[in-house]
Image (cartoon, grey):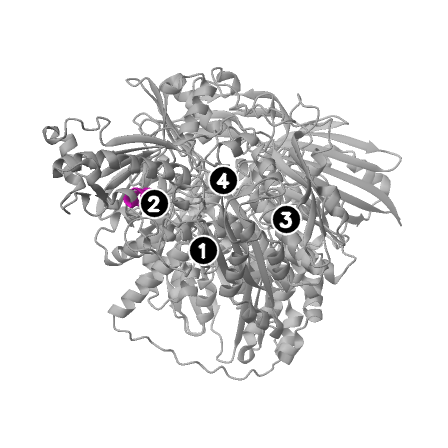
Amino acid sequence: MSEEHGKPGQGIGARVPRKEDSRHLHGRGQYVSDTVIPGQREVAFLRSPVAHGIIRGIRKPANSEGRVFTRADLAEAKDIVAPSTLPTYKLSGQPPLAHGKVRFVGEPVVMCVARTRAEAEDLCEQVELDIEELPALVDSDVARFEKSNRVHEDWDDNLFLTLSADNGFDALSKKATVVVNREVELSRQAMVPMEGKAVVAYWDERADQLIMYYSTQTPHIVRTGIAQFLGLDEGQVRIIAPDVGGGFGYKVIVHPEELSVAWLAMKYRKPFRWIEDRREHLVSGANARQHHYRLTAYADDKGRLLALDAEITIDGGAYSNWPFTIGLEPGQATGNLPGPYDFQGYRCKTYCVATNKPGFMPYRGVARTGVCFAMELLMDAIARAVDRDPYEVRMENLVRPEQMPYDNVVKKHYDSGNYPAALALAREKFDHSKWAERQKKGEPDGRKIGIGYASYCEQSAHGTSVFATWGLPLVPGYDQSAVKLTPDGGLEVRVGVHSHGQGMETTFAQLAHEILGIDVQKIKITHGDTGTTPYSTGTYASRSIVMAGGATLKACQELIPRIVKIGAFLLGCKEDEARFDKALGVVGPDGRAVELKEICTVWYLRPDRAPLDVDRRGLEVSVSYKPDRDTGAFSYASHAVAVAVDTETGQVEILDYVIAEDCGTLVNPMVVEGQTLGGVAQGIGTAMYEEIQYDANGQPNASTLADYLLPGPTEIPNMRIYHMETPSPYTMYGIKGMGEGGAIAPPAVIFNAVNDALRATGVEVSKTPLTPHRLLEEIERARHQQMPKREAA
Amino acid sequence: MQPISLTVNGEKVQAHAEPRTHLGDFLREDQRLTGTHLGCEHGVCGACTVLIDGAPARSCIAFAVACEGREIRTIEGFGEDAVMGQLRIAFNREHALQCGFCTPGMLIAARDLVLRLPDADEQRVRVEMSGNLCRCTGYRGIVRAILSVLELRRAGNDPAIEVKPAQAVPEFKPFEASAPAVAAAGPAVALAAVQKAAGTVIEDEFTVDHPLAKVWEIFGDMPAVAACLPGAEVSEHTPTSLKGKVSTKFGPMKASFAGAAALERDESAKRGAIKGNGTDSLSGSRARGDISYQLFDAGNGRTRVAVAIDYSLQGPLAQFSRGGLVREFVKKMVADFAANLNARLGAPAGAAPAVAPVMTISAGSVLWSWLKKLFGSNS
Amino acid sequence: MKAAAFEYLKPQDVPGAVKALAGSAGDAKPLGGGQSLGPMLNLRLARPKLLVDVSRLEAMRTIEDKGAFWRIGGAVTHSAIEDANLAGCTVMSDVARNIAYRTIRNRGTIGGSLAHADPAADWPLALPALAATIVIAGPAGERSVPAGKFMKGAFATELAEDELVVAVEVPKLSPGARWGYWKFCRKTGEFPEASAAMLMDPERKLARLWVGALDGAPQSLDALAADIAMRGTQAVSETSVSAALDLAVPGQEPVSRRLHVTAVRRAVQKGFN
């Protein structure tokens, strides 16, 4: 369970350095923006300066035919409409370019084309927009009840969706002796991959295909979407996702700009390129995390949670995205709020409200960062109410290992794990007593020490049955992997998922190595091209290693009998006398062996030496896979943190950060650590730095990285991570997904620590991000009780 | 297009570039050196870091034409460089990259750090690398990789670390300070700014040495009122409306909001409002400003004027977090308006102490030229 | 995010630069390191018709020991100051070292920073506290302005459209001088939310205390500075700093006030530690 461990060799559990690093270390990565197709034109978008308004007119500059486009010009392109089977869900059509109305600041209205991007931007400046402003719907609590002013006129209110759950609430809440109320809130933020959206589109006349170099996590579903919205056959669209500079959920969506550029290439049969710049990203891509919770916990006098009542409001922005829909976030919020805890009474009402902001999209962790924040702050509040150590109260409420597999209050099926052990491990490695002592002693500089804990579980590899309940237009099923041995004994693996930092070019090679023993350097993983890889819905929801990885394991296993058949023939023994050995190849009863490489040579180049009844499907196979029980493999973790709070500046310093995590069987501990630490860094951003505020007109206050602060090396502590390994009973090799988990707990654990530090002052913070300004405001308010509460919207 | 010649990765390059083309675009698009990545194009993220004459710099905010004669080195230009080689090995071993987008800039900044600060410890490495953002790794691998290369180099070199003797600071001897040669420019403007429903409201009040009737009259004279608002020009007006524009200049930023205003006058209450809207056509930004005023008889032939501006800004010019700067700007406009009005009414100097200090306006500002015009016409 | 078109000119000398600026009726901007102007250009917030590159004018690139003071050229970069060991003015290196990031410091210039006059920048706060002088070149030749009079407000300075900061002159500190500088940034290298600088130089009878990162120009707290000169840190309390700020920066909202009180107290504390 120690840090830095790894199994020897190159298979599952080995700390194999990444194969994909070399090109990046030499500046030879290939991103969409690096692509140049001769004759390519550059695209820029003119975006709405106001949040809500009626487009009265658009005046194009003179002689701009074929260079300036509005929605009316894009006749062949359909609006992006994401249907859902969820009851109460309302459809919102998102035009590729705004039509009739603008619904958020930054919504693309006009598309301009020129020789260079600078000239395309010059052209944008010559277009005149006549927009009649309407009052902006900025506050979801107001918009929820507003019926006359609506984001979508064809609706009768501003509710995208209302979900509710009620399981055993009345009976159990009555038994409570302690009732705790809290209100918590997360602000709106952007995902900020270092590379924004990017697309190069052209028509390949010979292939008769629209070819798009596309910065996406999900090339196959993007193809489905583009074909649908342009009325093309899927065979007429090929999506190539080369190196992708970070995804985090931002790149699982078909965005209106991408559709517009695809239309250009289809219409004009010429190459076009659009690269989202940082201002466009921050203004038009502020689409994540904004939840508001009103919570009531019903507990006994030891702090044992009996029932939970929740009202969740999600600020959904203006449009439902395709294909994940606006339903995903409220669906996950409602279903995941109970978290890793064992209680049986739950009532929840979730409102997803349309507002004049960019449409909500699934950011790493999806709703779970929000629900973990809500639940873990509540857990600490319960502990305070019963005057007990939050650690103890949390420990007693966690699902116990002997209850596994455990069906929780909303029938989520927790497959495996020891949640209390992870919490205990975090506390032990964190050295709780050391920090408690330091807290008691006080700091020489007057800062206040706080200790926080947070636990969560992360449903990974959600399968068909789970996605179907979220009502998506596109439900993932089986993932495929196509593997092929090469004549020289190497292996090619083609998968439909995409790797953009997750290291799958290495970890998938480790999986194949685990079965076939081929050196990972000789295993080539191909991904990211619909023209060369089997269909997959792609990389999201911590699913790739379980799904496409599982398919790869299965496919390699399927090759073994075929290998053995040739090997046995070469050894002159019966098939059932021979066995496959990863190191030796095929081994006969006398111990003689024939190498895999020779077997490959025989099949491809010397079939004259092959048995007559050779398996004629050959040494390549495409296999599909999903776990038999596809309700998800649950990774989980506990985080522990010590902070120092400077009450004179509102500055919070993270002094120590410990993660105890269990994602089942570790494929590559180094990659697991990288994913976790990166997730935590983003979570720290959510907790302390990242925010886009909107004024009453719906104007965002951040369009540069000087306004929107991303944590840098001095803002992220030197985190320590410890592993547990409880294999999932349902997946190949017990592997669980884990790409999102790191981003889930940081706001919760940091706020708990800060509240612990400030307990004596009566300050309790509950809104992200915890900026010095926000914290000082709370401290000042506690100092002078009369100061009225004032929060920016 | 302007001709430039410079050296890129050791090769002489003769090329043409538009002055506005930044070095990052020049390297990527003209030289096809795509290892230099653009992450923000405003000098914050560090992905575009290259060496200019050996020193790391942001290529997104250096213009290619300004690099005439310079030596540029990009991630593609480090061939067998020993330190870069060590860093590459360490970055791979310590899992210091994931998506790879920040990596080239990160390596170039790291190499500079290793060469410049051979004794750097972890905290120093973190501080020095803080100009390079990574969204994937959480920095631990990056910091570890750099520390390991520093370690490696220290082990290989003569570890003669210079220890500076602590310098004794003499005991502080109290003294009587001489008056500062300069008085400060005066206290900052102290007008209240209140965030209201749809905008920010700034209020001011001043007294003029003229009877209410005269002041009320001038408030009805639109060209006169507009002339008191810095940068305002009236192109046409009726008793209830006007058209025109307001030009503003804020440091290097300029905007010109063209639009219309509705005028309201309540004779009995001696109250009025000018409600204006305008658009800056180039940026597409919109400004709304409602100036309301009310006059009160202050006795002895004097009039107290209460003015408030309720303003909001929309579009690209509004999308920044430092709202205090804009507030400061608008406060100044209100104060200038008050001062100008006072001047227009011929009030003796010093009659409006609340606004006098802000008359320290930078020469060359729009207001300054306007004031010169105003004073010029009066003399 | 590409700049609007502009013309670029690289004059041979300072008079050439001044002439170019004077000849373009307010539509020209001098270009130093471009670390503030560059982003504004790319964002199209600034749209000058002409950029006059002064970053390579030799007359503005030197650091000279003038006996009682150092003369630092306007086009000297922050990193050159960071790396220089200016006898009697090592505090200049300390200030420089904490400006933004090294890559920014490698290009950004002291004159450019002053001329840009961002209220949160370091030099507009540090130089008045150090009793420095700003040397300005214009059509009529050179003139000098005390640093405390140079900045007039947010992005507003003493400079006319056809003037340049050619140098700053920083007096050397006496051996017994105390210098304290403190700024509060949400993250390393970003603009501070509050800052303060203190100089107590008994030999020169100089007592300076300035507060920065306001909405407008930095402000001096002269009376409090004089009191510190007489009584040392005893003169500094929550109450005395608040009272000084009430005069110099009236009407601050409570959180900003809290941060600026802290900045002043910590700058003083640093000076006396």
Residue C188 coordinates in the image, percent (x, y): 49, 58
Whether residues under marks 1 and 4 lie with C-beta atoms below 8 angstroms apart, the answer is no
Estimate the spatial distance between the alpha carbons at disc 1 and disc 2, rounded to whole Å: 19 Å
Quadrant that contains the C terminus of chain A:
top right
Which residue has dot 4 on it?
A632
Horizontal placement of A328 versus C41: left or right?
A: right
Name the kind of residue labelled 2 in the image: Thr
Q: Nearer the viewer, mark 2 or mark 3?
A: 2
The three-letter amino acid code for the residue at tag 4 is Gly
Q: Main secondary structure of the magenta part?
A: helix
Q: Residue A155 in the image: x percent, y percent? A: 67, 23
User: What is the CA distance from the residue labelled 3 to the residue labelled 1?
Assistant: 26 Å
**Can you tell which of label 1 and label 2 is closer to the viewer?**
1
Q: Secondary structure at mark 2?
A: helix
Q: Considering only order in the chain, which callout, 4 or 2, is on the residue closer to the N terminus?
A: 2
Mark 1 is surrounded, within 10 Å at the Cα level, by few (under 14), some (14 to 19) or many (20 or more) other residues, namely many
Q: Is residue C124 visible?
A: yes
**A624 versus A770 height, above or below:** above
Residue A507: mark: 2
Q: Residues within 10 Å of mark 2 (few under 14, many from 20)?
A: many
Distance, label 2 to label 3, CA atoms, is 34 Å
Mark 1 belongs to which amino acid?
Met
Q: Is residue A513 above or below residue B277?
A: below
| Residue drawn at (33%, 76%) of the image | B162
